[in-house]
Image (cartoon, rainbow, N blue to C red):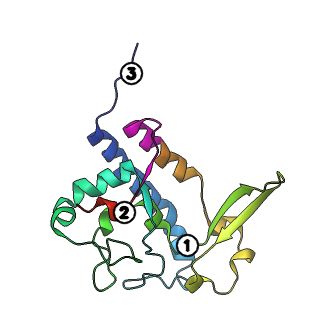
Amino acid sequence: MMMNAKKPEEILEELKDFYKNLEEAISPLQGLHKSRLKCGHGCIQCCVDEITVFEVEAENIRRNHQDLLKRGRPHEPQACAFLDDWGGCRIYESRPYVCRTQGLPLRWIEETPQGQVVEMRDICPLNDTIPPIEDLDEDMCWTLGPFEERLATLQVKLKGWDSDRIALRELFE
C-alpha cells in the first residue's frame, strides 16, 4: 500500500514550524553571546553570493516573494542576491536556515582521511572575541547536524532523494 504524499503547502507549513523551532533553539545562544555578536543591519560579512539552499527553502522564498523575484533585481554579484542597497535582507522573514544561524559560534564533527573523528569550530571573524571559540564549552556553540537533518527530511518529503541545492541568485527570473 502506497503512502499518501504530502502536498507542497503542507511541507511548507512544516518548514514554518522548523524555523520557529530553530529560532527557539538559537535564542539562548544569541542571548549568551550578545556582547560578542556584532551582526546587525548593514553587516553583510556572511551574506555571500555562493549561498545555496534545498528546494524546500527555495520554494518557500518563491511563494513568499513572487513580486521581488519577477520584478526586482538581484544585488550585485559577490554579495547575496537578496541584499538591498543598504545591507538589509529583502526576504528576512523567509531567510533560509543558513542565514538564521550565521554569526553564532558553530561546531560540528568531521572524520579525517585517516579515520580520526575531530570537532571543528568556526565563527565570523567579527565575532571571534574573548574567550576564543576554541575555549567555549560545546553547549555554548550551535552544533551543526540535528537541525540540518530535519531540514533534509523536509527536502525528501518535497522532492524525494533529489537533493540538488539551488543558488539564491538563481531564484530571480
Task: Residue at 30% x, 51% y: name it.
Answer: 59
The answer to whether the residues at label 3 and label 1 have Cβ atoms under 8 Å apart is no
Callout 1: few (<14), some (14-19), or many (20+) C-alpha neighbours within 10 Å? Answer: many
* Among the two numbered marks 3 and 1 on one chain, the one whose residue lies closer to the N terminus: 3
Q: Give the residue at x 32% y 46%.
A: 12
C-alpha span from label 1 to label 2:
21 Å
Q: Nearer the viewer, residue 97 or 173?
A: 173
Say whether disc 3 or disc 2 marks the residue closer to the N-terminus.
3
Q: Is residue 75 left or right of residue 23?
A: left
The residue that label 3 is drawn on is 3
Q: Is 150 situated above or below 24?
A: above
- Given contact means CB atoms under 8 Å apart, are the residues at marks 3 and 2 in contact? no
Q: Position of residue 81 (x, y in %)?
A: 33, 71
For the point 50% across and 85% down, the residue is 38
Q: Which residues are magenta?
A: 153-165
Which mark is drawn over residue 104? 1
